[in-house]
Image (spheres, rainbow, N blue to C red):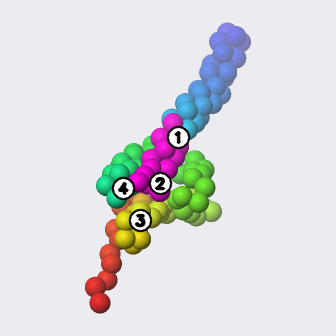
Amino acid sequence: MKYRKAILCLVVLLVPLALTAQNKVIMSKYQADLQQLFQQVYYAPTDNERFRASDEALALFREALATENSIRWEWDFGRLVSVLTAPDKKFRIVTWLVADDNAEYECFGLLQVFSEKSDGYEIYTLADRKSVV
């Protein structure tokens, strides 16, 4: 009987660790895939390639941010992408720029916000609204 309790306690302690390790693997994969896409966003030779890569990055980043506990992941894209997370983990803002061949920029981004109503995170796409003068 003592062994059963000990095994049960061990399983209860190890299951969260296994889930954390699995989450690290998933998030590391997202990080690597997004890093490649953002390299294309900044260094691809044509407008079409840069904007296509940005669209793919936007979709993949939405998917990554929808992953459970993604708010705890420390995204690092160097200077390519700005990732700002509130100290209390209530929200995160992710933004990047895409340059066209005329040296004009379009901004893209996502907002990850904790919702008390749903007790989870909601993700919003940020839109670049250029004002017409």
Q: Which is more N-terminal, label 3 or label 4?
A: 4
The amino acid at mark 3 is Ala
| Residue visible at 57% across and 53% down in the picture | 77
Kindly state the secondary structure of the residue where label 3 is placed. strand
For residue 99, side relative to residue 1 (left or right): left
Where are the magenta residues, as a range?
Answer: 29-46
Vertical comparison of 12 with 113: above or below:
above
Q: So how many labels did they put on this image?
A: 4
The residue under label 4 is 46
User: Do the CB atoms of the residues marked 3 and 1 lie less than 8 Å apart?
Assistant: no
The amino acid at mark 4 is Thr
The residue under label 3 is 99
The amino acid at mark 1 is Ala
Mark 1–mark 4 distance (CA, rounded to whole Å): 23 Å
The residue under label 2 is 43
Indicate the position of residue 66 as horizontal and vertical percent values: 42, 47
The amino acid at mark 2 is Tyr
